[in-house]
Amino acid sequence: MAHIQLKNISKTFGNHTALSGLSLEIADGEFFVLLGETGAGKTTTLRMVAGLEKPTEGQVLIDGVDVADWGAAERDVALVLQQYSLYPRYTVRQNLEFPLKPKIRRLPDAEIKDRVARVARTLRIEHLLDRKTDRLSGGEMQRVSIGRAIVRKPRVFLMDEPLSALDAKLREALRTELKNLQMQLGATFLFVTHDQIEAMSMGDKVGVLNHGRIVQTGTPHEIYNNPRDTYVASFVGSPPMNLIDGRLVDNRAVMAPINFELPLKGGAGTSGATEGRPLVFGIRPEDVYLESGAPVEALVHDVENHGVEKILTLRVGDTMLRATVPARTDFAIEQSVRFAWNPDKVVLFDKGSGVSLRHAG
Amino acid sequence: MTQIELRGVQKFFGAVQVIKDLNLKIDDNEFIVLLGQSGCGKTTTLRAIAGLETIDQGDILIDGKPVQHLKAADRDIAMVFQSFSLYPHMNVYENIAFPLRATRKSRSEIDAEVRSVAKTLQIGDLLNKKPSALSGGDMQRVAIGRALVRRPKAMLMDEPIGALDAKLREEMRAEIKRLHIKQGSTSIYVTHDQIEAMSLADRIVIMHEGVLQQVGTPDEVYSHPANLFVAQFVGSPVMNVAEATVADNASAASVSVGGAAAGFEFPRALLSKLNGHAGGQLTLGIRPEGVLVRREATDGFLPVETQIVEPLGSFDIVDLKVGSKMLRARTKSGFISGAGEKVYARIDPSQAHFFDAASGRSLGVRL
């Protein structure tokens, strides 16, 4: 079990800056998810903790000790990747035993047997133990890879998009399994993904990474409800938060350029927003309501049917925004509707910097 | 006016049967989506309709006339693929005009038609560009334009937006839907993405291992799946399924899952609707939104313990332990704070599905 700290890390590859001034802290037993797009620096960060990459600047601390001079093996971390990298000619059992049988410090046979059995039970792969790994499905292979990582009882688990290659249904199932496993083991997990649903559903904490910088760290709830900037707002949540350009006039949101207006609540959220300052108004689709007497008229541009609910794309002039409605309501394309928003849920961002006024102050 | 009908279609690749006795009628102007996992036979079916694949048995009829012996070119059907397959050395204008060059149309007629299609697809300003200078979305617009310009009897699309990134995919999906409403041509669209199918289709055709599983409107397929495969393929998060035992409690029916002693309360009408199946092997299916959760003891609700909570932003998915089984419930965001809470759950009878455990077929119980 371990506490991990990255202090002011920078990493350059030639001219390319992969990470700059990155600091983060992962508490012992925490499930920490690093969320970002391809090229954001997620995998580089993970490899740095693993000891596969050296920072150009800054420190990596495990349990308070600077591990700069420690090799990957000494750090005692387990790595699970998207590609399964199992030994194809070995059985599942042999794959699981392998990390316990190094040339030096080999464990006693009884202990090996015991640990493999326990891991197999946890991951529900007992019935597969004597099968060759090339005879397994994708989900089974990924379970074995995870099994091979946990059988060693490492201090830290590092996972690089381990679910990305699986189909949707399996991904959903393994998400829960991984989270359960982490809680059972009480282990420290650093999990890297580009999928915000994975980040939200599994993470105790989520760090959003953009262009080699941490934009925001927080619980899924904080990241979703109080995004630090428009990048986080549009990256987290599916569908993403609606972001509409406008200005504050008389405590009302006046949208440019087509001039529709909606009421706002004053108070903490809007402090610092002076009249006429260019702003971006953020509102989640579930906080946009369709009502016959509502203030703004729009046309239905698209209907996305999720079965349990529908997500409408509304068009007002050139502005598009999304609204979530119950599944049982029927809308036709180009139908005219009226909408309002929940003024308590509006997040105001500075147009220039994109930073939320709640965070700027 | 184009109707397409498949009658008893069979197709083998060597010893492997990829289409098994497929019967399907597609109405004029209808937007049909073939939905299934890779290898289910959906693309083969589409290619058979287009004439790019022969069939071993059965009939394919277009407007009542068998066409299975006609070449692709003689069926008057347009195809759009995932790979855009544009001519790289021709500009957008020439790519769209190409299918008309072989016809006896005059230059000015062709010009008018190319420009009209380009206008519909909002690519009028790209006409002089080469495909290599276009974005993925624009390339697919051009490919659709080239298909439309011939005014084919039907448009067949094979995962046309599968290669685009998520945001563009949503945009293009909306465009394809809007175009269909405007142009109103019979369309068949292949995808493995259930949201795409639910959002585009007038009717969805779900296939699995070469066998048609269900044909229905998005609402029918979601609310009344014909079997366990459809039930678990459509909808996210996946529908809960559990072996269930039904008992008669005099005043109500009781449905227990996961070997739990106490059962969920159902109207007694369930017993007669199960019609003799009550004693047999039953599988209960319930979507996460059909599992109702209360924090305080409520009549008709069973005490259960929460396991992990997945916050998904606008809502949470909470795992509930019922006997040895886990049922996933959809709740308001933040309703349950974490694992180990005692809460009370009920299964909404009107959203419950009962399947024959052996065959997986829905017993059609509606309460």
Image (cartoon, coloured by chain):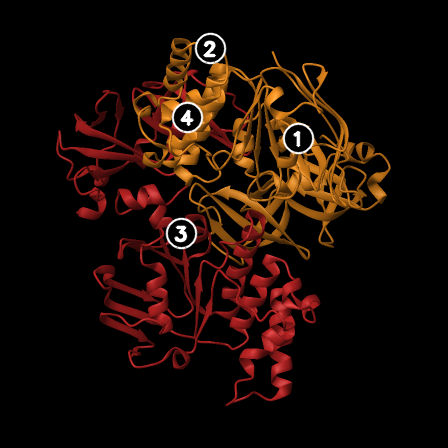
Chain colours: A red, B orange
Q: Are marks 4 and 3 on the same chain?
A: no
Residue at mark 1: chain: B
Residue B333 is at least partly visible in this image: yes
| Horizontal and vertical percent position of residue A319 | 30, 25
Looking at the rendered structure, the kind of residue marked 2 is: Lys
Residue at mark 2: chain: B
| Of the pair B101 and B161, the residue shown nearer to us | B101
Picture disc at residue B48: 1
Mark-to-mark CA distance, 1 and 4: 25 Å
Point 37% across, 26% down: residue: B92
What quarter of the picture does the C terminus of chain B occupy? Answer: top right
Mark-to-mark CA distance, 2 and 3: 51 Å
* Residue A166, placed above or below residue A315: below
Picture disc at residue B95: 4
Mark-to-mark CA distance, 4 and 3: 36 Å
Mark-to-mark CA distance, 2 and 4: 16 Å
How many C-alpha atoms fall within 10 Å of the one at disc 1: few (<14), some, or many (≥20)?
some
Please state which of the two labelled residues, at mark 4 or mark 3, is closer to the viewer.
4
Mark-to-mark CA distance, 1 and 3: 38 Å
Please state which of the two labelled residues, at mark 2 or mark 1, is closer to the viewer.
2
* Residue B35, placed above or below residue A318: below
Please state which of the two labelled residues, at mark 2 or mark 4, is closer to the viewer.
2
Q: Circle 2 sits on which residue?
A: B105
Q: Earlier in the sequence, mark 2 or mark 4?
A: 4
Q: Tell me whether circle 1 and circle 4 mark residues in contact (CB < 8 Å).
A: no
